[in-house]
Image: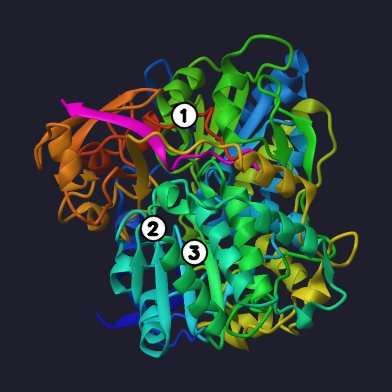
Amino acid sequence: MARTSRFRACPLCEAICGLELQYEGPELVAIRGDAADPFSRGHVCPKGNALLDLEADPDRLRRPLRRRGRDWEEIGWDEALAEAGERLAAVQREHGADAVGAYLGNPNVHHFGHIAYLPALLRSLRSKNIFSASSVDQWPSQLVDWLMYGHQFLLPVPDVDRTDYFLMLGANPVASNGSLMTAPGIARRLEALVARGRLVVVDPRRTETAAMASEHVFIRPGTDAWFLLALLQELLALGPPRIEAYAGKLNGLDEALGAVAAFDTSGVEARTGVPRTRIAAIAAAFRAAPAAVAYGRMGVSTQAHGTVCQWLIQLVNLVTGNLDRVGGSLPNEPAFPVTGPGTSAGHRDRWRSRVRGLPEFAGELPVSVLAEEIRTPGDGQLRALLTCAGNPVLSTPDGRGLEAALASLDFMVSIDVYVNETTRHAHLILPPASPLTQPHYDVHFNAFAVRRVARLSLPLRERGDEERADWEIIDGLAAAHAAASGKPWRTLPPPLAMIEAGLARGDSGLDIAALAAAPHGLDLGPLRPSLLSRLQTESGAIECAPPLLMDALAALAAVPADAGGLRLVGRRHVRSNNSWMHNAPRLVKGKPRHQLVMHPDDLARHGLTDGGRVRVSSVVGSIETDAVASDEVMPGVACLPHGFGHDRPGTRMARAEAVAGASYNDLSDPAALDGPSGNAALNGLAVTVAPA
């Protein structure tokens, strides 16, 4: 039978690579990178090919499930939505609006039907108890963007294709395919950079990205702020800030740089493990480069000083004149705007969590308080929960504590395609149809891309009679809840109408017809300076010294040096995307990837053997796993991947259950936070190890 090809963007990670999906009749038989996609240019990683597994997965849910004791029964969509809406409304009638909460997982941003339709549902719930994966990920970046530039998504992106010097902290885009930097085929882009200039990676581990870099600098976990402060001091010692391009658009720069200059970094080598002379050399090379950019990602965000780190990175780019400059860092100008009129700029501390009193950011509370809000009795106790495309038992701090709390809820409903470690506690599971049956536009990833691009993905097959699109489920749940609550509800338009309206808010001139006529996507050109004309601060200027950040810097000065011991950091593999892909045979085949990596000297010091079983303990709990010796990590550092630990009873993911490995978040501490943002401090976790 002759094959036909259809095209769309991959929905499985931030790279949004173009895919060529090959069909024989109605059957999907092969997936390749779309060579005609002007952005990804044929690149595809193993996750793209794994769509074949996800489409055919026998464990994937296709009809709603209702829990009956330890068993599940399939029910119809009308019954499921009505029951979910009524039970959520009943909890709110008895206990108040905040008694119902919601947790939104990482995959929500990969699906237009989630990202565009969930806000209306959450507004209808009117609960202050909204949580998401953002607070175990990128809140420090969003907070700094809001404070400095006036919008949480006015995010300067590294101009990787045109820079000459790339300083990268706590990021491994060769494994992640880029993050808050949509860059398909990033390895190829970095190879070109190394050929023409320099890539310097600062990381406690010699990652896949560090291995191809011009230079790798080991740094002790959680000490990036001291490194960046010393770097800024060295830059200022080389000459005055290069700020001519920002004339009249800077507030508080002298105040910020004065605080940086006064900070005592005399002990920077003792804290970070990086010699001062090496920091000075990096500063000199950064300043001398025709174009340079500093960038930090997960490793600097998910630590105790993540917001300070992200602020200092912005200042490095600013004082060297590389902010909003070709070859430096520039915000994208997406065809579908995520900043400007009609978008959510952000806010902070409009309310606080009930138990610990932590401030909200952008309408959400830190997910680290979720378990305590469920298990702590009293007025406002969280008694019902909606989870959408998330698995917080494996992906948020103290997963064992959270799963015990979930088991105590009066009601839980999950929008998900699996019975996983979290959804096994739900009373109802509502599974969306395949993304291949739904239109999609990557709202946020196009906005964070290293080029100005746009691509519309159209359905590749019709949905079956028993399938519901994600937007239909969310809209239907909102309608059912509104009906049960006696509230008005107006059904939202279908996705293509919503995408058309979003495009109309921009100035690209594109519409649905133009995108539909370009099945491989459109390249609208390289990034262009636009930050200064788009600032949304009250002053209309870049706020260089926000009081919240100045206070955080002052508090940093009082932080004692690490007394030593073993510090745990995470890692990612190109075949893993959080926890939910371990049911795909193509992604779990090959060598095991679950092990704890330790330096050979540390293994010997703790009486451990290469390949042996170890017990890893923190203040929260203990796990057992296998240890391997490697000099890819510096002494004093242990490295464990995130997203493993599929050993909970009651799940229905047969392939994942057979995957070895323990959960990182059975060790992480919900009390460990980045102070200004409330983001979980998952990296640099103090642990002990012993033979199992």
Left or right of 409? Residue 320 is right
Task: Count all numbered tags in the image, as a single digit.
Answer: 3
364 left or right of 161?
right
At x 47% / y 29%, what residue is drawn? 669
**Is label 2 or label 3 in front?**
2
Residue of label 2: 203
Element carrying mark 1? loop
Q: Residue drawn at (51%, 35%), measured in percent from left and top? A: 560
Q: Quadrant of the C terminus?
A: top left
Residue where numbered disc 3 is placed? 14
Whether residue 284 is in magenta: the answer is no
**Alpha carbon distance from label 2 to label 3:** 21 Å
Q: Earlier in the sequence, mark 2 or mark 1?
A: 2
Q: Which residue does the image show at 79% across and 77% down from the upper left? A: 246
175 and 323: which one is in front? Answer: 323
Residue 275 is situated, as x and y percent measured from the top left of the image, at 40, 60
Residue nearest the viewer, comparing 551 with 280: 280
Mark in the foreground, 1 or 3: 1
Q: Position of residue 280 (x, y in %)?
A: 48, 69
The quadrant holding residue 487 is: top right
Which image quarter: residue 3? bottom left
What residue span does the magenta drawing correspond to? 675-692
Q: Which mark is residue 304?
A: none
Quadrant (top left/top right/bottom left/bottom right) for the N terminus: bottom left
**What amino acid is found at the position of numbered circle 2 in the picture?**
Asp
Disc 2 on helix, strand or loop?
A: loop
Does 690 appear in magenta?
Answer: yes
